[in-house]
Image (tube, rainbow, N blue to C red):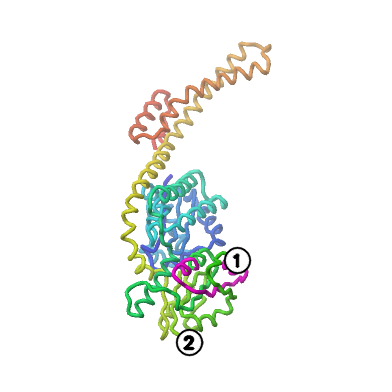
Amino acid sequence: MHIAVVGLSHRTAPVEIRERLSIPEQSLEASLQQLRSDDQVLEASILSTCNRLEIYTLLRHPADGIDAVGAFLSQVSGLALEDLSPHLFTYHHEDAVAHLLRVAAGLDSLVLGEGQILSQVKKMVRLGQEHRSVGPILNRLLNQAVSTGKRVRTETNLGTGAVSISSAAVELAQLKLGQARGVDDLVPLDQEQVAVVGAGRMARLLLQHLQAKGCRGVVLLNRTLERAEALAGDLPGLPVQCRPLDELDHCLSTCSLVFTSTAAEEPVITASRLVGLNRRSSLMLIDIGVPRNITADAGELPGVEAFDVDDLQEVVARNQEARREMALEAEGLLLEESRLFLEWWDGLEAVPLVNKLRLQLEEIREQELQKALSRMGPDLSVRERKVVEALSKGIINKILHTPVTHLRAPQPRQQRHTAMKVLQDLFELHDNQANG
């Protein structure tokens, strides 16, 4: 068996490729079932966010399993594998474990230490369990990733004041508005007419950061008006006007700054839609949805600026250096957590040998028990027979306890192999698979 992860992220693929591989939650169960339908994929879990799609797997054979995952990604994206491959990364075993822990800790995020990724990893674990696509190996690894992410945020300062994609989007707006005014710094948003399209988690964070940056009011548009109103009710300090999505044209005509963060699979703002509007001012569009909510050609219109998640790098770079020292502290914790998982994994190598030894001793116990019971004659009561049988099982368990504990304990691999070889020779447990 072999642990591997195949995927892409903001580091390896532009948004136009990432959006082709965005898997919405309603499609996740079918995707997991499709992956598991290949006999090379023993366990599977999918992490799909605006900045990454990663497939964590336990494979029967590395090469064949990776081919199966590649074929799945090609089918989902509609791209030929040779066109998709330059954007993909593949990590095996130790590297795959280390990568997952880095992701959960926020060290692989666009924004170092961002907190939302840990919630997304937790969600990956929950959905993998609900859809029964993970087994004992990935279940242990994924849960350890969650506990590692929590530990990093508890024991280091990496999570303190960490910005998110949403806060970076707000800062990007401040930066671009400042540059338009000849100021190379963030400017307050108190003069802007602001709208937010969408009412999910990212939109909630957008509203919180807009409020913190001096925004005086926001128009919140959503397909479901009740959801927008519920979100607005959680932010009593920010004036929020809730509107149905069919009033989007009016907002695009009257607002100067519009953020989009919806789960729509097709763009909600296009150049053709904007052309027909009688806009009163210049318009800045900032899209943090993946798939994108705004078409790329919208920014080509006069008076319109359009940015997507890949444009956040400019803002992120301003904050990144100050967080690198914190990240170094977190790396030490990741090495420890990775070692703990790999030691547990190495201990699994002894399981077939231990099972064979247990089976051999159980056969001996059963044979000797039957001989002893036959000698005792028919007058032995049922209770007495159970006591004798429990005694024999107890002796076997006592005999097995020390060697099993020793073989499963954390230790160098060569040391474990030596102990396994001794056990094989002493009990004549010759099995080519037992040595791994």
Instruction: Compare residues 195 and 345 and report the one nearer the observer.
Output: 195
Q: Which mark is residue 125?
A: none
Left or right position of 188 against 26: left
**Quadrant for the N terminus in the image:** top left
**Residue nearest the observer in this picture, 103 or 18:** 103
Residue 400 point in image, percent of width and height: 47, 25
Q: Is residue 405 above or below residue 150?
A: above
Quarter of the image that includes the C terminus: top left
Residue matched to label 1:
230
The answer, for residue 60, to whether it is visible in the render is no
Q: Report x, y in % for residue 240.
A: 55, 72
Q: For mark 2, does the 10 Å Cα neighbourhood hold few (<14), some (14 to 19), or many (20 or more) residues?
A: few
Q: Nearer the viewer, residue 284 or 120?
A: 284
Q: CA distance from mark 1 to mark 2?
A: 30 Å
Report the label total.
2
Picture layout, residue 282 above or below residue 36: below
Tag 2 or tag 1, which sits nearer the N-term? 1
Query: Mark 1 is on which residue type?
Result: Ala
Residue 170 visible? yes
Task: Give the amino acid type for the residue marked by disc 2 in the picture.
Answer: Arg
Q: Residue 61: within the magenta?
A: no
Q: Relative to residue 223, is residue 122 drawn left or right?
A: left
Residue identifier under label 2: 280
The answer to which image quadrant residue 350 occupies is top left
Mark 1 secondary-structure assignment: helix
The residue positioned 38% from the left and 74% from the top of the image is 187
Q: Secondary structure at mark 2?
A: loop
Q: Of residues 324 and 93, which is closer to you in this image?
A: 324
Q: Which residues are magenta?
A: 207-232
Residue under the image location 47 percent in, 73 percent down? 215
The answer to whether residue 390 is above or below residue 147 is above
